[in-house]
Each structure stands twice: as C-alpha cells, then as structure tokens.
Image (spheres, helix red, strand yellow):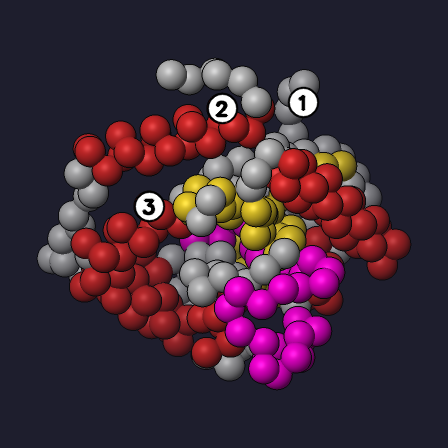
C-alpha cells in the first residue's frame, strides 16, 4: 500500500538546524525528521563504538555494563535516534529527538513502542529463517510506521556467519579509499567547527574515489538474492 506524504526539510540558520516547523497543529501526513534505530547487538562495525571512542556517549547511557564488548548479548533492544534530513546523520539522545519532532511524551512513547514491536516481530522471523538480526531502522509518517520493515539496506543481518547488509559495501569502500574516507572525517569536523551546513563542500576535490570493481557488486547482488530466497522460503532468484 502506498500513501503520499509531505517531506519538510529543516533550515540551517545561524550555524544550526532549525526544526521549529515540525509539530505545528496544521501539519498532517509528514515524514518525521528522525530515524528510529533498534539494536539487538553491538557488532564491531556498529557506529555506536565510534561514538563511544569519541566520548559522545557512554555505555551507561545505553544501559550497558562498563565491561560490555562487541558481540556480547543485549537482553532488551536498545533504541537509538538519528537525524534524517541533514547531510550527516547526527545521533541524538531521546529527549533531543523528541524535541526536534516537537511531539508529546505520550506520542513519543507510542512511536518507541511501535519500533520495539516491529523490531521484535522481524527479529523473531529472522531467527525462524536462519538469520541473526543485529539492528535495523524504521521511519514514521506522523505517528504511523511509514517504512519498509527489515531490508538488506536498512538492517544488519548475518546467516551462517556471513554478514548480509550494506556494511559489506562500506567496508570495501573504506579499504579501497583510506585517504578519501579520512578526508570525509576531516571535513565533517571542520563543518562542525565553522558552523557550516554541508561537509561535502569542504572536501578536497583532488582526492580521488576508487569504486569497487563490477565483480564485487555482482557478488553483493548474488548474496542479497540468495538471502532473499532464504528469507521468503522461495526461489525468487536463480
């Protein structure tokens, strides 16, 4: 089922993003500016570890013990939040996400509960099909779940120890382009310091980008197709 929705873009004013247009009483059927992430585990590739290493969050903030390490089990999914419409995903504390959305405590709790329920359904189904679902994200239109729930591009899954997600593409790009990737990180920091809206305009254009070979993408597509066959228990692809 398809339903059209409005996309409102925050404005960059005086060095920060302005979200005051969200939550107005006359607004209906619009995409919320926040991505809702549910984490069943924190593998080494998770962005959480980068934030922990930078001191942006602590394990205590996530309700985890001080000796928690990649691969350890999480009893209850961790909910995480990031901006959706900014050039760089910006992770937020729950109260920050709620403030940008400009919604009530009751409605914020309602979206969180829907996220947990959707995550639980998909995680249990993944197990039934031989997958481990490590994390995933969903988006909302108003208070309604308005997103595909669980895809190879929005979730991180493994089967028989094989990672099946876009993380494989990220890892390959980083391996081929260490200087280009380092320049992204440098430009992001410069944009924050200077109060600039888009880090991409600050990147050095002389640093080239090397794309993975066509054979790599063929292998990725084959992996995703095989994963799809297993997910739906049907031979959709050869």
Instruction: Report helix, strand or loop for mark 2.
Output: helix
Instruction: Report helix, strand or loop for mark 1.
Output: loop
Instruction: Give left or right: position of 204 versus 146.
Output: left
71 in magenta? yes
Identify the image quadrant of residue 40.
bottom right
Residue in the image at 53% along x and 36% along y: 151
> Sequence order check: which comes first, mark 1 or mark 2?
1
Residue in the image at 72% along x and 63% along y: 75
Horizontal and vertical percent for residue 52? 51, 76
Q: Are marks 1 and 3 in contact (CB under 8 Å)?
A: no
Q: Main secondary structure of the magenta part?
A: loop
Horizontal and vertical percent for residue 120? 73, 45
Q: Are marks 1 and 2 in contact (CB under 8 Å)?
A: no
Residue denoted by label 1 = 3
Disc number at residue 229?
2
Q: Nearer the viewer, residue 193 or 82?
A: 82
Instruction: Report helix, strand or loop for mark 3.
Output: helix
- In magenta, the rendered stretch is 58-87
Which dot, 1 or 2, sits closer to the camera?
2
Disc number at residue 25?
none
Q: Residues within 10 Å of mark 1 (few under 14, many from 20)?
A: few
Residue in the image at 77% along x and 44% along y: 117
Residue denoted by label 3 = 169
Q: Quadrant of the N terminus?
A: top right
Which dot, 1 or 3, sits closer to the camera?
3
Numbered circles on residues, count? 3
């Amino acid at each position: 089922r398809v339903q059209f929705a409005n996309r409102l873009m925050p404005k960059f004013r005086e060095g920060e993003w302005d979200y005051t247009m969200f939550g107005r009483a006359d607004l209906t059927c619009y995409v919320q500016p926040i991505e809702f992430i549910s984490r069943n585990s924190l593998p080494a590739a998770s962005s959480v570890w980068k934030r922990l290493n930078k001191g942006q969050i602590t394990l205590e903030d996530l309700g985890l013990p001080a000796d928690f390490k990649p691969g350890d089990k999480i009893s209850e999914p961790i909910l995480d939040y990031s901006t959706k419409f900014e050039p760089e995903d910006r992770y937020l504390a729950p109260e920050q996400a709620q403030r940008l959305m400009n919604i009530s405590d009751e409605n914020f709790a309602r979206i969180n509960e829907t996220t947990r329920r959707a995550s639980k359904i998909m995680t249990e189904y993944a197990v039934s099909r031989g997958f481990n679902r490590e994390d995933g994200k969903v988006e909302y239109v108003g208070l309604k779940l308005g997103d595909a729930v669980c895809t190879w591009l929005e979730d991180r899954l493994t089967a028989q120890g094989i990672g099946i997600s876009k993380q494989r593409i990220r890892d390959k790009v980083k391996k081929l382009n260490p200087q280009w990737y380092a320049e992204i990180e440098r430009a992001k920091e410069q944009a924050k310091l200077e109060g600039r809206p888009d880090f991409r305009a600050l990147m050095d254009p002389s640093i080239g980008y090397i794309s993975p070979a066509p054979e790599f993408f063929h292998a990725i597509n084959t992996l995703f197709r095989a994963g799809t066959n297993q997910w739906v228990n049907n031979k959709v692809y050869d």
